Image (spheres, rainbow, N blue to C red):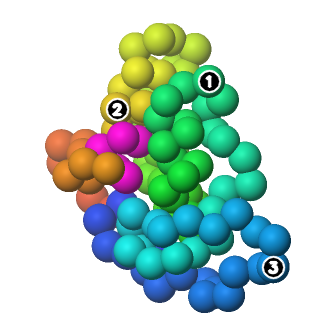
Amino acid sequence: MGCGAGGLGAPASTEIPAGAHKVFCVKFQRDMEGLEEVPFEGHPLGQKIYENVSKEAWKMWVEHMKMLMNEYRLNLGTAEAQEFLIKQMDEYFFGEGAALPAGYVPPQSK
């Protein structure tokens, strides 16, 4: 998936299973299957994500977050790293997009 470069790949499936949580996804700009539970229970951003982000967009974020954690060598045991990722997550879904590290070169496709 080209999430690191800011591109949006096509979602894997357009069908929403019966009884699934449905959202109008902020990344894909259409109705899609939402997350099964609120991420970061008790944090306002978690509820906002639950209400506006699809499972497919969340998967893209997880891959982007892994890249950020590796490139910035984040220690999630620190409040600073956690705050940084929450800010990046907010920007990724609801702002201008999460920043790529300076000098970041995406891995070559095989």
Sequence-wise first label, 3 or 1: 3
Q: Mark 3–mark 1 contact, CB under 8 Å?
A: no
Q: Height in image: 89 above or below 30?
A: above
- Residue density around tag 2, few if under 14, some if 14–19, many if 20 or more, within 10 Å: some
Residue at the spot 62% in from the left edge and 24% down from the top edge: 42
Gap in Å between the C-alphas at discs 1 and 2?
16 Å
Mark whose residue sits in front, 3 or 2: 3
**Residue, disc 1:** 42
Figure quadrant of residue 76: top right
Dot label at residue 87: 2
Can residue 94 be seen here? The reply is yes
Amino acid beneath label 2:
Lys
Dot label at residue 18: 3
Report the magenta residues as a range: 89-93
Amino acid beneath label 3:
Ala
Residue at the spot 69% in from the left edge and 81% down from the top edge: 16
Q: Position of residue 50 (x, y in %)?
A: 58, 49
